[in-house]
Amino acid sequence: VDLNCDVGEADTPEDLAREASAAALVTSVSVACGFHAGDPGQMKRMVELAAAGEIAVGVHPGFPDREGRGRRPMQLRPEEAYDLVLYQIGALDAFARRAGIALQHVKPHGALYNMAARQRPLAEAVVAATHDFRGDLVFVGLPGSEMEHVALNGHVPFAAEAFADRSYEPDGTLTPRGEPGAVIDDPEIAAARAVEIVRDGRIRTRGGVVIPMRADTLCIHGDNPHAERTAQAIRRALGEAGIEIAPFGTGPR
Amino acid sequence: VDLNCDVGEADTPEDLAREASAAALVTSVSVACGFHAGDPGQMKRMVELAAAGEIAVGVHPGFPDREGRGRRPMQLRPEEAYDLVLYQIGALDAFARRAGIALQHVKPHGALYNMAARQRPLAEAVVAATHDFRGDLVFVGLPGSEMEHVALNGHVPFAAEAFADRSYEPDGTLTPRGEPGAVIDDPEIAAARAVEIVRDGRIRTRGGVVIPMRADTLCIHGDNPHAERTAQAIRRALGEAGIEIAPFGTGPR
Amino acid sequence: VDLNCDVGEADTPEDLAREASAAALVTSVSVACGFHAGDPGQMKRMVELAAAGEIAVGVHPGFPDREGRGRRPMQLRPEEAYDLVLYQIGALDAFARRAGIALQHVKPHGALYNMAARQRPLAEAVVAATHDFRGDLVFVGLPGSEMEHVALNGHVPFAAEAFADRSYEPDGTLTPRGEPGAVIDDPEIAAARAVEIVRDGRIRTRGGVVIPMRADTLCIHGDNPHAERTAQAIRRALGEAGIEIAPFGTGPR
Amino acid sequence: VDLNCDVGEADTPEDLAREASAAALVTSVSVACGFHAGDPGQMKRMVELAAAGEIAVGVHPGFPDREGRGRRPMQLRPEEAYDLVLYQIGALDAFARRAGIALQHVKPHGALYNMAARQRPLAEAVVAATHDFRGDLVFVGLPGSEMEHVALNGHVPFAAEAFADRSYEPDGTLTPRGEPGAVIDDPEIAAARAVEIVRDGRIRTRGGVVIPMRADTLCIHGDNPHAERTAQAIRRALGEAGIEIAPFGTGPR
């Protein structure tokens, strides 16, 4: 299984240091491209860091909304979404080429991710932008979502993403952050859940029901103080379960 | 000689129509990339238009200053300038690849162009970003400027740009727009000056002195009502002088 | 009745000239505040122009989305909408105070207007921001909309806006722009409709049904070539019908 | 003497918590207004926090450059600088009025501060914007700078700002951050320097020379981990020296 985290969203030297620490514990990073966060300088540094550490690099395109950090729904025409995803892929690709690596994947950010999970025309737009840029670029999204259906129908490589430190509902969606128990703070419980998802293909929901759950990649959140300990616990537990941790794509080339 | 104009800076349907008309009269266009003007949708349309019309496409990177339209000097560290030029090249390249063409050139916009003409470290940064993206990408700039020196020293292909509808000073710089006689409104005079520059390698300055002037490409301004008549007069005069009008690069591939 | 037009959204000298012409034909202007369009310099000029011409000035707050010109729905929490409307009111007020006038009204722009017409919590937020800034600031919106209900419940002065050059549906909403007949190009027909709305309090819909329609202010679009002739025809027809054209507020003070 | 710190530039909940801690140790805060950092929501929260804590509130206007955090010089026409400072004052004033307080001061940020310290026309523009908004708004700047000269000539109230935790050069400017010894990490040394400046009106420069130095307000940096201890040491040392700590203006009204 792959471990991924989101980077390139730092605003202070400390945020940057934390992102670099988190990146050192994963096998893939998704880099913000200046729309919801980030800027050309951060993109270059993160790509260089990943290339040096043999971490696979992907694009993390978002809505043009810095104030809202890309988390506020914006209703764009599918063509507008296509254009802004393709733009962000191209921008990051320039830094990847410079560092001698190929981009591995595209994973939409925030509201774009959540909306494309449910809205077919938006899912089609972001998947098409990914495919049109390079046919073997992997699209990362929620298993069972419109993003997955569209990718598979279009023969676009797809990687299913799951969250070991978040609670799930019976329908396979994440428990909203505001709800009690939505975020799992205990590193050992998160680690056990990571193994449950990856080895057993299932997860116990908040209410106790067990549902099927797949993951080609587990998302590690880099933006809280527990993140590092959680990531370490997950790595150890996966290792003890005999599961190899590696990028889902071909990795940096 | 090549004829170029700047596009992708339209804000209204009429601006867009005017840009399309101007583009039809040139052999190369430089497309704004969303920093000083433009957006992903305009970039896509302009690239498609150029590809359909067999017009060569280049990048027109500018400072991140929409309010000032990229015309206000910003003092960036050379590394910051490198990063933002590389970013903009990559973003446009995604649309060019999609349209099946290769980018021909990079021509900085506004204050970035003027500052890089005089400041060696800035010129080095923008030329390096161009070269690092693709070794045969042509850099377009002012003849005799730091941009040219840096490009030639670095074995980066360089195209000298001149202006048939602008007055020059004895030192080879353009007469500032505020000065009387800075802009040449009469299409026939502009056309005669185009021939003087391209065929004879010289130009008469505002004060009457004749100085050497080279041009691999003549810039046609698309943003005034005379532009279209001026462009037509220049095309006719160059044709009568037996000068071929063609992109300076290999054109769209 | 008041005639209003939207200004401060110009990107070229010609747009600016057109806005100034349109402003000369109305009694109130709504000025963009740098979020969906405009910038501090344009705000200052437009306020000065209005103050000199004794035209009443209002705020035209929009979503922070320059690429989409504020026309793309963004889903903000009501508190975020409150904050950005209050911010834009304050920003314009600084220029109004400098010019010695008081702001007359607040009229949301584009997607913010349309969404606040239908969504109660959003309507509450934008009306509250208006009221909290100054209790006698007039809120301009669609008659019969959530904006009107919220304003009237909160004892916030409200001015109903209608459109003489647009077709209506039986439910009192505007025919979407894409539909045939949505925009009325003939200045004389628009003028007759203006009189029908203001004098008779009703309008014939696209399908022929006559519905009640009120207007304290008629919106004149400044962004098309017919605008000026339409505005002149409306002024003349209203005059012939004995209807006084004046700001709905106290006008510039 | 007054103690001030810059706020409203937070990008994460932790930055926000740190700003709130720093604000609790000062008597005045300068709030970023969405150009170089910040947004309407942060402005509102910071103003509310200050109003509740009886801390005086000022405006911290900066260049429109989020990527560069307002630290990169931009060459604007003085009129453009005037407009953007007035805009930012108005925007913050809306939140101050809502909280029932009056703005105390205007202190330019970053590159705008440094450039206005040396360039007379720019200093005139930012001081005029401050004065035109409200005649008794205090302008905060470097003692001996163009900002001070312009303010005093124009009868604009001026507060001199000094830095207890930074090293000075013989000409009264700050030692650039890159230089050794530029930042004083030891809270006790910073505290002793605060007393030296405020009580004795002088400071020992990096080279050992003692120069005159005045301060109506001492700037406390909120953006490093030592900040809180430094602020506490300065407060204690000033108290032991019998110096009252209070806003330089009339404080919140």
Image (cartoon, coloured by chain):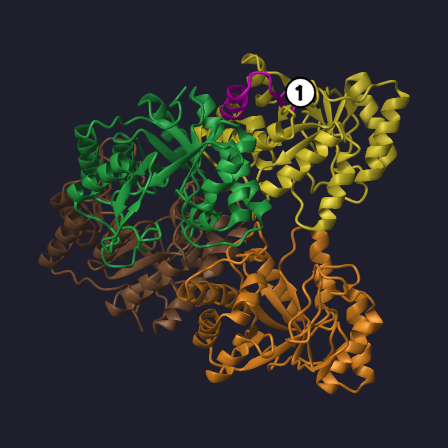
Chain colours: A orange, B brown, C green, D yellow
Residue D130 in magenta stretch? yes
- Range drawn in magenta: D124-144
Residue labelled with disc 1: D159
Tell me the element at label 1. strand
Amino acid at circle 1: Ala
Between residues B120 and B55, which one lies in front from this camera angle?
Answer: B55
x and y percent of residue A95 in the render?
54, 65
Kindly indicate the quadrant of the structure image that contains residue D201.
top right
Instruction: Name the foreground residue: B10 vs B69.
Output: B10
Left or right: where B55 falls relative to C68: left
Is residue A9 rendered to the left or right of residue C8?
right
Asked whether, in this view, residue D66 is left or right of residue B227, the answer is right
Image quadrant of residue A202? bottom right
Residue D57 position within the rendered picture, expressed as x and y whole percent measured from the top left: 67, 28
Residue at x-position 59% and y-position 43%: D39
| Residue at image coords 31%, 67% | B48
The answer to whether residue D151 shows anywhere in this view is: yes
Residue D115 in sight in this render: no
Q: Is residue B123 magenta?
A: no
Q: Examine the rendered structure and indicate whether residue C152 appears above or below residue A12.
A: above
Q: Please give the count of numbered marks on the rendered protein.
A: 1
Q: Is residue C68 above or below residue C94?
A: below
Residue A126: x percent and y percent?
48, 70
Chain letter, disc 1 residue: D
